[in-house]
């Protein structure tokens, strides 16, 4: 997280000057209020620049970005959660092991996604129940054969998702919560 602000250049790229045809990744940062006498008040770029969703480019002399891949590549897609919705009551197994836990998760597609990362845990747990990466679908079914969630852990489960595009992870989605039905309900 960096702030590049208040700089000036007698040529190009008052804030960032990238003339090496390389890739610049700016995460959680701000490029603001920079000036250049020639071009690219905020950024002069001969490579590629990618900002994540928490980065900003503003208030630089005009034009703010000059070069290949300008305007700046847009922030990565952040998945929108679809199901289970906030407060849903999810499946549980049986004490005798004759039923499985089956939880279905769904979120919005992100164009050009190569991987999604799903993270699910109980608020009181130190490790997640689900922490899976490396699938390219915008849904996932968690199944645990013969398993059950004990009564002490039925409430306050949280889940979130992020996506990988062009080798970069997006920010996490918002977090939704669900509860689990009592054991032996099915």
Image: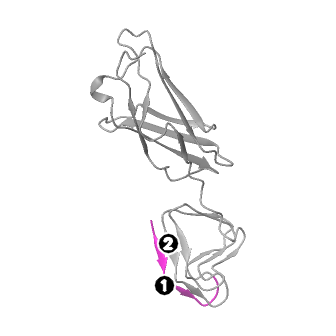
Q: What is the x, y in percent for residue 23?
A: 63, 62
Using a 10 Å C-alpha cutoff, classify the residue at mark 1 as few (fewer than 14 neighbours), some (14 to 19) or many (20 or more).
Answer: some
Give yes or no for residue 11 being in the magenta stretch: yes
Give yes or no for residue 102 being in the magenta stretch: no
Q: What is the x, y in percent for residue 144?
A: 46, 20
Using a 10 Å C-alpha cutoff, classify the residue at mark 2 as few (fewer than 14 neighbours), some (14 to 19) or many (20 or more).
Answer: many
Residue at point 53%, 75% (across, down): 31
Residue 135 quadrant: top right
Residue 89 quadrant: top left
Quadrant including the N terminus:
bottom left
User: Residue 73, labelled with which disc?
Assistant: none
Q: Nearer the viewer, residue 132 or 14?
A: 132
Which residue is situated farthest in the left direction here? 152
Q: Mark 2: which secondary structure?
A: strand
Q: What is the x, y in percent for residue 122?
A: 35, 35
User: Residue 6, labelled with which disc?
Assistant: 1
Quadrant including the C terminus:
top left
- The magenta segment is 1-12
- Whichever of callouts 2 and 1 sits on the residue coming sooner in the sequence is 1
Mark 2 in CB contact with mark 1 (< 8 angstroms): no
* Horizontal side, residue 24 vs residue 89: left or right: right
Q: Nearer the viewer, residue 45 or 171?
A: 171
Task: Please count the marks in the image.
Answer: 2
Residue 57 quadrant: bottom right
Rendered view: 150 above or below 8:
above
Residue at point 56%, 32% (across, down): 140
Rendered view: 152 above or below 109:
above
Q: Mark 1: which secondary structure?
A: loop
Q: Tell me the residue that label 2 is attached to.
A: 30
Q: Nearer the viewer, residue 73 or 174?
A: 174
Spatial CA span between label 2 and label 1: 11 Å
């Amino acid at each position: 997280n960096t702030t590049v602000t208040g700089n000036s250049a007698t040529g190009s790229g008052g804030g960032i000057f990238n003339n090496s045809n390389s890739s610049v990744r700016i995460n959680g940062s701000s490029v603001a209020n920079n000036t250049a006498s020639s071009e690219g008040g905020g950024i002069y770029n001969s490579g590629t620049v990618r900002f994540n969703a928490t980065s900003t480019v503003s208030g630089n002399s005009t034009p703010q970005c000059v070069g290949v891949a300008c305007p700046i590549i847009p922030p990565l897609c952040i998945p929108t959660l679809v199901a289970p919705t906030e407060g849903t009551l999810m499946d549980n197994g049986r004490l005798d092991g004759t039923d499985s836990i089956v939880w279905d998760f769904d979120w919005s597609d992100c164009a050009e996604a190569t991987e999604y990362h799903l993270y699910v845990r109980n608020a009181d747990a130190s490790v997640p129940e689900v922490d899976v990466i490396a699938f390219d679908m915008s849904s996932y079914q968690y199944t645990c054969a013969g398993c059950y969630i004990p009564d002490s852990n039925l409430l306050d489960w949280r889940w979130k998702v992020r996506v990988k595009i062009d080798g970069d992870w997006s920010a996490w989605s918002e977090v939704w919560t669900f509860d689990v039905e009592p054991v032996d309900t099915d």
